[in-house]
Amino acid sequence: MKHKVLIIDDDPNIRLVLKGIFAGCEISEAQDGKAGLAAIASVKPSVVLLDLKMPVMNGIETLKKIRELSHRPLIFVLTGNDDVEIAMKALDLGACGYITKPFSPGDIKRVVFAALAEKEEQDPHPDRFWRVVGKDE
């Protein structure tokens, strides 16, 4: 089964890089949170890669709205900011991972597929928090 990955990021270059990393998956894109919510409702992705800083609706606002949807994908927050408070807020709102930019393509792919495998196995620890650190750490 092909996994469906939704990339919600206002930066077209980040979307392009992520499309390459997850090339074997069914990819959908949105450039802001509002368009991302519509895509979640129509595409029903397995995974959402969600930027925090975007116009129209930022990542935290988008996470709050995703909690109201019937379809609840795995959500990995993408950010250029390594702020622990924001990471904890994202986790409290349902994100299962926090990925700092720049990220390693191999690490992000490994973490996302590990989380998908756990979800498919109905892991007894669904609240596990994944984090990919930037290349420089």
Image (spheres, rainbow, N blue to C red):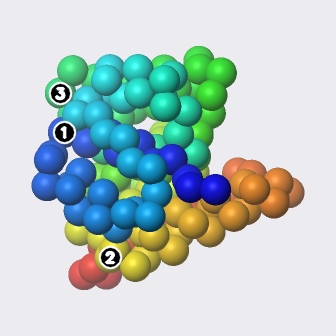
Marks 3 and 1, the one that precedes in the sequence: 1
SS at circle 1: loop
**Res. 29 image quadrant:** top left
Q: Position of residue 48 (x, y in %)?
A: 46, 44
Query: From the viewer's perspective, is residue 102 above or below residue 78?
Result: below
Q: Amino acid at mark 2?
A: Ser
- Badge 2 crowding class, 10 Å Cα cut-off, few under 14, some 14 to 19, many 20 or more, is some
Residue at image mark 1: 10
Determine whether 78 is above or below 137 in the image: above
Residue drawn at x 40%, y 63% as measured from the top left: 22
Quadrant into which the C terminus falls: bottom left
The mark nearer the N terminus, 1 or 2, is: 1
How crowded pointer 1 is (Cα within 10 Å; few <14, some 14-19, many 20+) is rated as many
Q: Answer yes or no: is residue 106 visible.
A: yes
Q: CA distance from mark 2 to mark 3?
A: 25 Å
Quarter of the image for the N terminus: give it. bottom right
Residue bearing mark 3:
55
Residue at which label 2 appears = 104
Residue that appears at 81% across and 60% down: 121
Q: Would residue 129 appear left or right of 124 to someone viewing this image?
A: left
Residue 121 in the image: above or below residue 135: above
The answer to whether the residue labelled 3 contacts the one labelled 1, judged by CB atoms less than 8 Å apart, is yes
The residue drawn where x is 45% and y is 70% is 109
Residue 9: x and y in percent read 25, 42
Which kind of residue does numbered mark 1 sit on?
Asp
Camera sees residue 88: no
Q: Nearer the viewer, residue 40 or 63?
A: 40
